[in-house]
Image (spheres, rainbow, N blue to C red):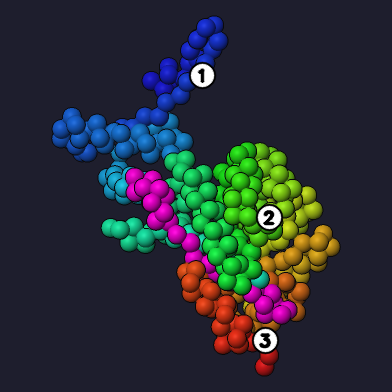
């Protein structure tokens, strides 16, 4: 059947390729009514489509997963419209001075019935369903609005927002970002967009990232070391900051190899005029090692977890007053 379906179909004399995904359900193993059989086959068919397989046999476990997924998908539409996906902000400090210089905006979704939905569930779902673009615009709007409020209260912070690989190939994204910055009357350098190595190296992403960079928006290469991991990429990508993956940071004091990798990254970045940020800093020993290696900025639980906007402002004021201290002495 699949072989026959894949045969090109002539339309106005032009052969058009077709394809299909088959879902298979068995009676009585999977269902005992025609309606239930059709529903089971439908679940199997959508699983085949998601995985790129030509066909798939129904599995009851996937039915439960599918119902949960459909419930989340339906709820996510409304959650974006109603502003239920919120942001918390993790401080980023200068290692040399200890000053708070920026924050990373991290998406949070609390479902009314299901409770907290982890980002590693709802972000891939948004990517698979085409909701990632409205979700990203919603988060950008929220982050920039918060940035304005902080600046008005004397906190001139730069806010970092993560981009999906799909955002990086969206030709309309630079225009949307420019419009948001103009709407909130913010300088472009108040915004930093974080992208992964793999996404940044996609050919379709190159013109999008170049336009964003020309706007003056700062670009950070996130989770450096988990993708193609070539230092030569730092030379060709239009980035301002390299964020070393927490896997290297958290093993830094125990694994000399990570010391060498981080030192090489810092030297290359400095030679190219980039800064380096360490993610996942959880102890003072690691922070001291990062300062010795010349890493510029850091974030992690040692400094602070992600905080709601009001708590972040209070944390920043306490830090300025000396009530919050991450000491490198002793």
Q: Residue furthest left?
A: 32
Residue 204 showing in the rendered view = yes
Nearer to us: label 3 or label 1: 3
Residue 205 is a magenta residue:
no
- The span shown in magenta is 74-100
Residue 102 showing in the rendered view = no
Name the residue located 63 percent from the left edge and 38 percent from the top edge: 171
- In the rendered view, tell whether residue 270 sits above or below residue 59: below
Location of residue 300 in the rendering, given as x and y in whole percent from the top left corner? 57, 73
Name the residue located 79 percent from the left edge and 53 percent from the top edge: 235
Task: Please give the residue where the numbered disc 1 appears in the rendered image.
Answer: 17
Left or right of 38? Residue 21 is right
Location of residue 248 in the rendering, given as x and y in whole percent from the top left corner? 64, 68
- In the rendered view, tell whether residue 209 sits above or below residue 320: above
SS at circle 3: loop
* Picture disc at residue 328: 3
Pick the front one: 67 or 305 = 305
């Amino acid at each position: 059947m699949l072989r026959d379906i894949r045969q090109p179909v002539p339309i106005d004399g032009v052969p058009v390729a077709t394809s299909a995904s088959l879902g298979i359900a068995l009676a009585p193993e999977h269902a005992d009514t025609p309606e239930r059989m059709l529903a089971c086959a439908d679940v199997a068919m959508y699983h085949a489509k998601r995985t790129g397989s030509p066909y798939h046999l129904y599995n009851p476990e996937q039915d439960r997963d599918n119902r949960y997924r459909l419930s989340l998908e339906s709820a996510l539409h409304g959650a974006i419209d109603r502003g239920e996906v919120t942001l918390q902000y993790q401080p980023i400090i200068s290692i040399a001075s200890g000053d708070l210089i920026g924050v990373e905006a991290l998406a949070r979704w609390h479902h009314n019935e299901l409770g907290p939905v982890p980002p590693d569930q709802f972000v891939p779902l948004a990517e698979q369903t085409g909701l990632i673009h409205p979700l990203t615009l919603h988060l950008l709007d929220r982050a920039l609005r918060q940035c304005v409020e902080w600046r008005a209260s004397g906190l001139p912070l730069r806010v970092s927002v993560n981009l999906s690989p799909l955002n990086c190939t969206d030709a309309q994204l630079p225009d949307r970002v420019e419009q948001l910055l103009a709407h909130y009357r913010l300088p472009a350098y108040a915004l930093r967009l974080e992208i992964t190595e793999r996404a940044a190296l996609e050919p379709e992403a190159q013109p999008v990232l170049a336009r964003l960079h020309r706007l003056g928006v700062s670009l950070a290469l996130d989770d450096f070391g988990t993708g193609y991991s070539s230092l030569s990429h730092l030379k060709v990508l239009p980035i301002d900051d390299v964020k070393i993956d927490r896997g290297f940071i958290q093993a830094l004091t125990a694994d000399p190899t990570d010391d060498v990798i981080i030192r090489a990254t810092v030297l290359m970045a400095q030679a190219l005029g980039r800064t380096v940020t360490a993610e996942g800093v959880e102890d003072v020993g690691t922070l001291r090692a990062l300062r010795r290696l010349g890493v510029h900025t850091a974030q992690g639980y040692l400094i602070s977890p992600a905080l709601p906007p009001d708590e972040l402002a209070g944390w920043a004021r306490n830090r300025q007053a000396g009530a919050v201290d991450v000491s490198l002495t002793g």
